[in-house]
Amino acid sequence: EHHVDPVVKDGIKIMSMGFLVADNQPVIWRGPMVHGALTQFLTQVKWGELDYLLIDMPPGTGDAQLTISQTAPVSGAIIVTTPQDVSLLDARKGLLMFQNVHVPILGVIENMAGYVCSECQHTTHLFRQGGGQKISKEMGVSLLGSIPLDEKIAVGGDTGKPIVVSHPDSLVGKLYTQMAGTVAAQLSILNSQGTGQFKPMDLQWQ
C-alpha cells in the first residue's frame, strides 16, 4: 500500500490536495471522490504520533463534512464565520449538522471582525459587527475569539510564516495562541468526562 510523507513546517505536519496537483489544475470533486481523497488522507499519510489532527473543511454541509463525521473519530468541531449574515447562514448550518451527528461543538471563531487603523487605532467594522457573538448566543456555544483584519496574517500566509511565528507578541498572535489553548483545554475536559471519541495521542495512522 502506498503511503505519503506529510510536509513538515514549524513542527506541524501538513497534507493538502494543493500539494498533489499543479497550480493551474482545478480540483473537481464529486461525492465519491471527496470520500476517497479524505479517506486516503486519514489512512495513507504517514502521520505518525500526533497530539491533535486538525481538518480544515469548506463552509456548509457538503460531502467533506459528512464523510469526516461518519468515517473518522471526531472529537469536536470549530465553526469559523465572518460577521455578516450570509456567512452566519453557512456557519449555522454547519453547526447544526455536527450537532445532529453528535460531534461536540468546541466553539465559534469570528474572522475579519474589524480593521484597526495603524495610524489612529480607530476600528472600522467592514463586514458588520457582532456576528460571532450572535450565533454563539443563539446556538448556546462558546465564542472562542474574534480575529480582526491584520495585514501580517495575509503576508504570513503568502510567505509561509504564520503570525504566531513572525509576530507572536502581536494582538492577533496572542489571540491565536489563546484560542488554541482554550480548544486544547476543552478537548481535555471532554476526554476526562468520557464524552470525547478518542484521546489526542491515539491518532497514529501509519
Image: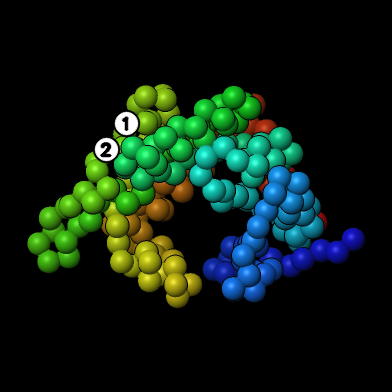
Q: Does residue 145 appear in this view?
A: no
Q: Residue at x 37, y 24 (%)?
A: 138
Q: Residue at x 52, y 28 (%)?
A: 96
Looking at the figure, which quarter contains the N terminus? bottom right
Query: In front: 192, or 34?
Result: 34
Q: Which residue is mark 2?
A: 130
Query: In front: 85, or 138?
Result: 85
Q: Does residue 126 appear in this view?
A: yes
Left/right placement of residue 150 relative to residue 183 reads: left
Give the residue type at disc 2.
Gly
Q: Which residue is mark 1?
A: 134
Within-10-Å neighbours for mark 1: few <14, some 14–19, many 20+:
some
* The quarter of the displayed image where residue 67 is located: top right
Q: Residue at x 63, y 27 (%)?
A: 101
Query: From what the image shows, is residue 184 above or below residue 168?
Result: above
The image position of residue 174, as x and y in percent, is 34, 55
- Give the SS element for disc 1: helix
Within-10-Å neighbours for mark 2: few <14, some 14–19, many 20+:
some
Q: Which mark is residue 12?
A: none
* The quarter of the displayed image where residue 109 is located: top left
The image position of residue 202, as x and y in percent, is 72, 44
The image position of residue 13, as x and y in percent, is 63, 63
Tell me, yes or no, whether the two marked residues, 1 and 2, touch with CB atoms within 8 Å.
yes
Mark 1 vs mark 2, CA separation in Å: 6 Å
Looking at the figure, which quarter contains the C terminus? bottom right
